[in-house]
Image: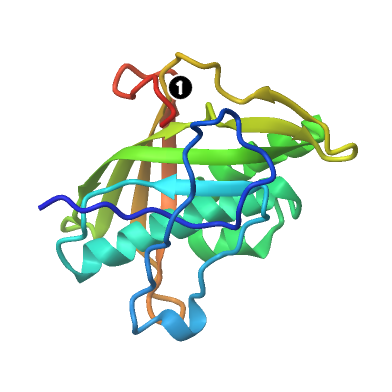
Amino acid sequence: MTGLLMLAAAPLALAACSSAPSPTPDISPNPAVAPHDERITLPETMGLALRHPAPADRTEHQILYTVQQSIRSQLHAEYGPGANDPLLTAYWSGDGLAAVRREVTAWAKRGEQPVGVLVVSNVSYSAPGADGKGTVSYCANWQNVNRGNSATHVVGAAVQQRGTAGTYTTLTFARNTGNRGGRWKVTAMTESPKSPRCPTSGH
């Protein structure tokens, strides 16, 4: 049976519209890693809603938790710390780390911060194969996220125009055997903006 798990943040100071989605409870870390793998706290003005089927086993739970953490680390870095935010290296590595740092740097160069609720839906999980790599694909919808000026805190236009399709994203995961607990990390990321695979609604 398909379940629904979403991610939480404090109440937002801005809603893009009266029916904007709300961030909701986090995926909990696996008990084995909970003591050193705390959930990432986002600013009150930024939230994340992640909708996906209930994990079928421990590995899927761990990888979906890493999806949550990797996206939250990206938003956390975009909001302030920038590309050198240590949270990025906790959940990203290799080509994946280089890709997410480019996106974070693009926000910083514009002097902007994300404000609102990012909706992640249409999640598809592929279990790790013989090479030890698994993938998760999803649609990222930014219609309810606006560009906030980092200096003046004035909120500008939405990141994604209403009525347009979201960004189809695929993350590749591999277990980092060199650190405590063998944490999964994003090793690659591909994105297709305005993908026909994604819904046009941000709710």
Above or below, comparing residue 45 to residue 141 in the picture: below
Rendered location of residue 15, percent (x, y):
61, 36
Which residue is farthest right? 152
Q: Is residue 92 visible?
A: no
Kind of residue at disc 1? Pro
Q: Which residue is mark 1?
A: 193
**Quarter-of-image position of residue 56:** bottom left
Q: Give the residue drawn at x 70%, y 30%.
A: 147
Rendered location of residue 84, percent (x, y):
71, 56
Q: Give the residue drawn at x 33%, y 46%.
A: 51
Rendered location of residue 59, percent (x, y):
23, 66
Q: Secondary structure at mark 1?
A: loop
Coloration mode = rainbow
Rendered location of residue 194, percent (x, y):
43, 18
Residue 93 is left or right of residue 173, and the answer is right
**Quarter-of-image position of residue 68:** bottom left
